Image (cartoon, rainbow, N blue to C red):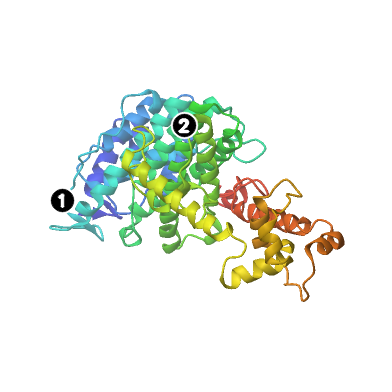
């Protein structure tokens, strides 16, 4: 039976508190009725006002809410959690301080309501709403407990600290304190993301109100988290080995949470929250993670595997061997694998030598080399009878240079004597050396593509201050 939208139990309880002169208890009862709607604004505003009154006992208020959370009805329990969350966000900080310092937290890890469902104020036996809402009550209570623990550890609320480039608390924090603060922030954010609801779960006014409070916290937590990560990356390359290892681990966890935050924001968008209030999450380039890992590897004195480097070559003489799991930096290299690598290297060198060892090799390559090599213009008899003088002190490099020149220069149309050619051209390998140097430079430039060190600072991404401004 109901009266004016409230159940008879609500009316009787409010009358009992009025007769006893317990105005605060009556207000808590009004905010946590059995109506399947969110707590009314007038009752929440009054309780926020009570937290600012010096003659109101904050412990008494908190204990009244905790007592209401022990009710068997899921609506009463859920609304007591919502009221507590609202006072944490908008009430006097004394309320948050008491919850953080008190052992009286919400013990709802096993809560389950198998009772009736509220339908237009009438109890309908066999309903499933209480059963379906129970998991969200357990997760919501866990998040509020985590929020209190974060305040206890840090002595401030992450949702209320200053953010931004200029005055952001986590943006200006030193490296040692930052590495201790970010794990606490991550734990609170994880507790929020574990709420894990979908659009079709938001089926009544009670869970909808809790979702809006969680959305508000998420925007502020992630903005604060983003400030901390930017600060961490700015200090990363000046850290010692231990701090850099911890920082890299925190950054990898940040990337995982970024995906989960995106999923939560998609639900918010689907239920009608204005897109202007939802930040656009932009992921950092993958090359940034590669650069961080390479820097840590340098500090630890180890080599980064080729698969993790952004400039890895697509072809390698050791490709098949390097892919083997027998490469273990701690246990050494397997002898069989070592022999395989040496065999591959020897085969590659022999193949290379066979191409460049003889300038008179048959085929198109041989004829091209013969046309571009000025020493081959002499009669065969003279070349066979007399050794060629080493004019430049690099005889072994001459055939290779001649072979390289065949790709860049056209063959001469007329054949001249070697002595005449030398007198007219001076050093016939000057252009070849220059072309080889240019080719090497272009390869080096191409190999550096995708490196994380070039361009502007890679750290400004994610939920910017402008993105979250509308949600404040």
Residue that label 1 marks: 115
Q: Which mark is residue 246?
A: 2
Give the side of residue 391 with respect to residue 360, left or right. Answer: right
Q: Residue shown at 78%/59% (left/top)?
A: 428
Q: Callout 2 environment at 10 Å: few (<14), some (14 to 19), or many (20+)? A: few
Q: Residue shown at 57%/72% (left/top)?
A: 363
Q: Residue furthest bottom?
A: 413
| Residue 139 appears anywhere in the view | yes
For numbered disc 2, what is the local secondary structure? helix
Answer above or below: position of 412 versus 33.
below
Residue sitting nearer the eye, 443 or 19:
443
Nearest to the eye among marks 1 and 2: give it: 2
Residue sitting nearer the eye, 109 or 18:
109
Q: Residue 108 at what x, y percent from top left? A: 24, 38
Give the side of residue 9 with respect to residue 216, left or right. Answer: left
The N terminus lies in quadrant: bottom left
């Amino acid at each position: 039976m109901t009266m004016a939208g409230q159940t008879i139990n609500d009316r009787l309880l409010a009358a009992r508190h009025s007769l006893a002169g317990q105005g605060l208890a009556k207000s808590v009862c009004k905010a946590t009725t059995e109506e399947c709607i969110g707590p009314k604004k007038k009752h929440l505003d009054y309780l926020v006002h009570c937290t600012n009154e010096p003659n109101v006992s904050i412990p008494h208020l908190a204990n009244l809410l905790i007592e209401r959370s022990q009710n068997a009805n899921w609506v009463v329990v859920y609304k007591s959690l919502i009221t507590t969350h609202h006072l944490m966000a908008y009430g006097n900080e004394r309320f948050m301080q008491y919850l953080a310092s008190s052992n009286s937290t919400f013990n709802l890890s096993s809560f389950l309501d198998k009772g009736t469902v509220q339908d237009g104020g009438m109890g309908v036996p066999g309903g499933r709403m209480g059963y379906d809402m129970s998991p969200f009550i357990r997760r919501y209570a866990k998040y509020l407990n985590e929020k209190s623990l974060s305040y206890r550890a840090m002595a401030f609320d992450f949702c209320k600290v200053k953010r931004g480039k200029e005055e952001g608390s986590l943006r200006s924090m030193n490296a040692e304190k930052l590495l201790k603060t970010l794990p606490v922030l991550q734990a609170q954010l994880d507790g929020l993301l574990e709420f894990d609801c979908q659009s079709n779960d938001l089926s009544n006014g009670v869970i909808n109100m809790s979702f809006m409070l969680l959305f508000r916290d998420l925007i502020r937590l992630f903005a604060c988290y983003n400030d901390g990560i930017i600060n961490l990356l700015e200090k990363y390359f000046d850290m010692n080995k231990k701090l850099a290892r911890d920082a890299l681990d925190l950054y990898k966890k940040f990337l995982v949470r970024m995906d989960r935050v995106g999923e939560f924001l998609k639900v918010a968008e689907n239920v009608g929250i204005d897109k202007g209030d939802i930040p656009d999450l932009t992921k950092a380039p993958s090359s940034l993670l590669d650069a961080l890992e390479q820097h840590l590897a340098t500090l630890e004195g180890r080599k980064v595997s080729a698969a993790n480097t952004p400039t890895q070559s697509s072809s390698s003489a050791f490709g098949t061997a390097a892919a083997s799991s027998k490469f273990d930096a701690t246990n050494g290299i397997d002898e069989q694998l070592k022999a395989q690598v040496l065999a591959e290297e020897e085969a590659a060198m022999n193949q290379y030598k066979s191409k460049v060892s003889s300038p008179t090799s048959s085929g198109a390559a041989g004829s091209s080399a013969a046309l571009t090599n000025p020493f081959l213009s002499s009669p065969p008899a003279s070349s066979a009878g007399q050794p060629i003088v080493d004019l430049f002190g690099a005889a072994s490099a001459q055939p290779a240079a001649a072979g390289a020149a065949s790709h860049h220069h056209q063959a001469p149309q007329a054949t001249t004597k070697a002595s005449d050619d030398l007198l007219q051209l001076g050093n016939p390998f000057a252009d070849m050396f220059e072309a080889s140097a240019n080719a090497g430079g272009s390869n080096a430039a191409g190999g550096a593509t995708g490196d994380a060190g070039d361009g502007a600072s890679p750290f400004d991404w994610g939920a910017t201050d402008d993105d979250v401004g509308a949600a404040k």
